[in-house]
Image (tube, rainbow, N blue to C red):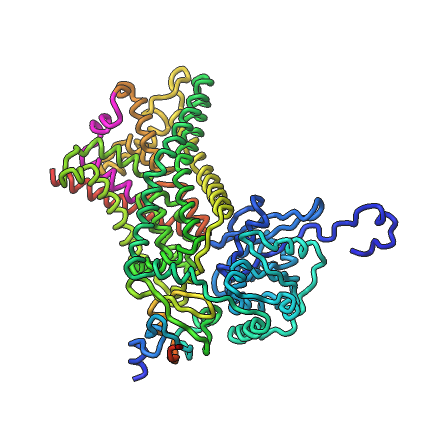
Amino acid sequence: MSDCHDCPAAAVAEPPPRHHHHTVAIVGPPNSGKSTLFNRLTGLRQKVANYPGVTVEQRVGRLRLSHTQQVDLVDLPGVYSLDPRTEDEQITRDVLAGMVGGVPRPTAVILILDSTNLARHLTLAAPVLGLGLPTLVLLNMADDLRSRGGETDTTALAQKLGAPVALVSAARGEGLETVSEFLRGAFAVPAPVELPVLNDVPACRAWARRVSAEHYRAPTPPVWTRRLDGIFLHPLLGALVFAAVVVVVFQTIFAGAVPLMDGVEELVQASGRWIGDRMAPSLVRSLIVDGVWGGVGSVIVFLPQILLLFLFIGLLEDSGYLARAALIADRTMARVGLQGKSFIPLLSAYACAVPAIMATRTIESRRDRIATILIAPFMTCSARLPVYTLVIAAFIPERELLGRLLGSRAAALLGLYVLGFAAAVVTARLLKSSILRSDRRTPFLLEMPPYRWPTPRSIALRLLDRSKVFLRRAGTVILGVSVALCFLANVPPGAGGAPPQIGESLAGTIGRTVEPLIAPLGFNWKIGIGLITSLAAREVIVGTLGTIYGLEGGAQEIGLQEALQRDLTPGGAVALLVFFAFAMQCMSTLAVVRRETGGWKWPALQFAYMTGLAYLCAWGANRLVLALG
Amino acid sequence: MLQLDVNKGAGTLASLQRGQSGVIESFDLPGDIVQRMMELGFVPGAHVTAGRGAPGGDPKVFRIDGAEFALRRETAAAIRVRPVPERT
């Protein structure tokens, strides 16, 4: 590094970059503002992936210090210690030891602690400083500390810890210049005055207390948090607020998202037509317009709803209310063997299972998390609605049931929602009393963070991040399947290279092949093709049936509802509804489950269970309707 | 006799009413859960105050070292405390 002192070129040229490409890890306990700091420092230059084989998310971002220097920041999961008892702790420990493939061993550590909770959070400093890596200690939420009358002597603390210490506010971007100073400077190995025995928790705590007692004055209790909890955790008011929050979230992701979704759909269709008009009819055109455009469009339509959903989750989580909601929901969820933290993901699943499954990350207990992931797709997601409305409109005459309050069609729809919910409850009980029985190793433990104002910046970053993950993961799968199906419907070409009759195409052949299997449910081969295409995404069946009946010559003039009335018995219609309520027809969900559970085991089990259940219940429904005549 | 007391939750965190405090004495929990509890601040000798809870009273929030954690009754009933007279 300093060998160049007497080499003449050094005087003219810039000094060679000393630390060309570092990896620096951000470590901190949950609720220390770790992700806020990471987002502040890296902004949009971040990548999200999973560590190989586990459910822990790997976030890496790049920080440019100068033209020649840049640093890769790794945002490690929030941990209370480095004892590897949870997956998060194991990963944190392994990354810090350089034992994770694809992640170079960090050359330095940024340890972030909540300054309003220093006596407790300093406990993590002992094992981190004990690693012997150059460490910068950031005491976050300086604004909170000040406003609540706390203070700390960073110089004295730095001396005690043997590492640089700075008071910062990651949310406001206050004091963060110390991070670049630290990263630019020469890294020094920490030289703490004394460290406790590292795997002795009481000793570490006693050390943390001692260190903080000398140079730290704890802030007064958060007055506003106490006042707000007086409302939000009030036995009566709290329950009312909770119910109101649930209703508002539910109402917005359904009613509020509709105009936006219609707009997006209109846009996709218009652009598809525009492209179609500019191409001669051919297999390629049909692949691009129906396959690529139609397929990707069917996913993009859900984006407004998903963004709204994540906006709510973001607001609830960043404000601190999510922890209270989990607390209130815990008793009810415990009845089916789950816990409070499963509540919000399951609520989200009414919009779409994909973001719901991504939202299960807040559940630490792996078994509870997997159980939540496995039952989430039973919640009636919005992709089932087009199918439900089509079949209900075709087969159920509109009648008043409770005067004007409830019509027969609305009642049928409501019944399907209840059916999905019941399947979820039964499945949860089944799972939690067998393969996912709660072990006493992970008791329900929920930290109640103080209430804070969510910052628009962090909400915006979160929305961007989630929509990127959603579009990439879901888009690629749907795209592939739609293109494949479109191809199957168009080969082998009929006479003169024209598209074949659907019955003659490969898709038709496949439909006829599965017909004996689905005949007991009251479905013919056309529904069979629809069931296969809807494996990609449920609502695809509507488009497929449209294509099939459209392609069938004479049926072109007849609406889809009438075509179904002609082709499906009442038993078959009810069976179709039941099948869609239970079956796992969503590639995006399976892809996300695989990603989140780190393998094919759980998605395979989920697919087999849901499809088996759907088949049996649809068969039963068909028989029942036949018997009732 | 002692066993009965534990079952009823007397002398444990679960028996503390809102605003009441206790000093942690011992745990009736598996070793690694005790480790986790201690990392959160539930160490023997620590001062814990019961706070509000879910509408039914379970889980309940406990205040320790300026932080708040919700515990289910089953967990709270396995942490023995010595009651501390209420401060005036």
Question: Residue at position x 39%, y 37% from top?
Answer: A302
- The residue range painted magenta reads A558-582
Name the image quarter holding residue A557: top left
**Which of these two is toward me, A459 or A627?**
A459
**Which of these two is toward me, A510 or A186?**
A186
- Is residue A525 in the magenta section? no
Question: Residue at position x 30%, y 66% from top?
Answer: B57
Which residue is farthest top? A496
Q: Is residue A225 above or below residue A605?
A: below
Count of marks, rendered view: 0
Which residue is farthest bottom? B1
**Which of these two is toward me, A168 or A560?**
A168
Is the C terminus of chain A in the top left, top right, bottom left or bottom right quadrant? top left
Return the x and y of residue A354 as percentages of the image width and height. Answer: 40, 45
Name the image quarter holding residue B9: bottom left
Magenta segment's dominant SS is: helix
Q: Is residue A371 above or below residue A416?
A: below
Q: Is residue A140 visible?
A: yes
- Is residue A559 in the magenta section? yes
Q: Is residue A529 left or right of residue A74?
A: left
Question: Residue at position x 34%, y 59% from top?
Answer: A231
Return the x and y of residue A111 as percentages of the image width and height. Answer: 58, 61
Is the N terminus of chain A in the top left, top right, bottom left or bottom right quadrant? bottom right
Return the x and y of residue A148 as percentages of the image width and height. Answer: 50, 63
Q: Is residue A319 left or right of residue A39?
A: left
Q: Is residue B28 visible?
A: no
Return the x and y of residue A426 as percentages of the image width and height. Answer: 27, 54
